[in-house]
Image (cartoon, grey):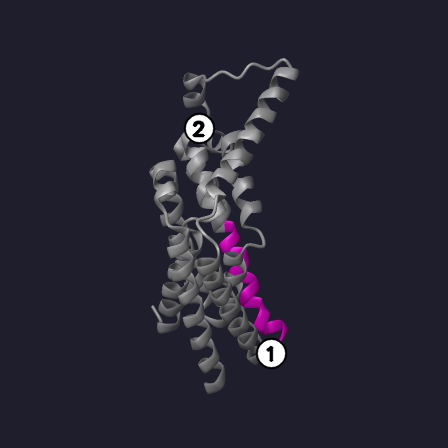
Amino acid sequence: MSLSVVQGFSKSLAMTVLSEIGDKTFFAAAILAMRHPRRYVLAGCLSSLIVMTILSAAVGWAAPNLISRTLTKHIATVLFLGFGLWSLWDAFHEGESEELAEVEAELDADLKASSETARANGKVMQDDDAKKKNRPLLSQFLSPIFLKAFSITFFGEWGDKSQIATIGLAAAENPLGVVLGGILGQALCQTAAVFGGKSLATQISEKFIALSGGILFIVFGIQSFFATIES
């Protein structure tokens, strides 16, 4: 494995873990896992994030082919430094957010709306484990729970700071390493959210995560700046 792949992998892994822990999609996975079978929630959330990581890395990989590599590196440097300062500002000027409660309220409202719709249509929701076991494996994972977890995570992550940072990282580093590190980081975070549940989510210090992430982004920005000068 080349050095460039290792660098892209390690940077992407660290950035993903610090960006996703305590994020909105992290809380959503934790709450969904308390209400639905964990394997469907984990499969839906992780599949969504893998798709998002690959798409973001593809955009970052294509950027140097559309504009000059030097300009791409300058943009990546500005993004990393900007996200770093943004995260530090959040850490020092905002207290512990109520994002967990907000996500839980949104999911409760969605669940209530779904239940009212089902009653209006005269449908009765029943758990039939025997039927589920007899269904093909693929159709089990393409269940409403899987699709719900996939869509909530995908649209919650779209345009998020971590997605844009992945694009910038893939433009500056080896895209394969960025994809592999991002997927592993997402797998670690989502597994922790699904199996740790709400008890783990409530113990996370968002201020500490924001501070750590801010420092990491600034380090990446400085490295990107010097790499641009050397090239």
Check the image and report above or below for 213 versus 73. above
Badge 1 element: loop
- The CA distance from mark 1 to mark 2 is 49 Å
The crowding category of the residue bearing disc 2, from other C-alpha atoms within 10 Å (few below 14, some 14 to 19, many at least 20), is few
27 or 163: nearer the eye? 27
Q: Is residue 61 magenta?
A: yes
Q: Residues within 10 Å of mark 1 (few under 14, many from 20)?
A: few
Q: Nearer the viewer, residue 92 or 216?
A: 92
Name the residue that disc number 2 marks. 35
User: What residue lies at 48% left-to-right and 55% top-to-bottom?
Assistant: 94
Q: Amino acid at mark 1?
A: Ser
Q: Residue at x 44, y 31 (%)?
A: 137
Give the structural element (helix, strand or loop) at label 2.
helix
Using residue 142 as the reference point, say whether residue 186 is left or right of it: left
Label the magenta part by its dominant secondary structure. helix
Tag 2: amino acid: Arg
- The structure residue drawn at horizontal position 41% and vertical position 51%, both measured from the top left corner, is 206
Q: In the rendered structure, are the residues bearing label 1 and label 2 in contact, judged by CB atoms less than 8 Å apart?
A: no
Residue 170 in sight:
no
Q: Position of residue 90 (x, y in %)?
A: 48, 58
The residue identified by callout 1 is: 68
**Figure quadrant of the N terminus:** bottom left
Can residue 69 be seen at all in this image of the molecule?
yes
Span colored in magenta: 51-67
Which-is-in-front pick, marks 1 and 2?
2
Q: Position of residue 191 (x, y in %)?
A: 36, 43
Q: Tell which circle, 1 or 2, labels the residue nearer the N-terminal end.
A: 2
* Residue 17: quarter of image: bottom left
Q: Percent from the top left, x then y, of residue 4? A: 39, 72
Residue 175 drawn at (x, y percent): 47, 65
Q: Quadrant of residue 13?
A: bottom left
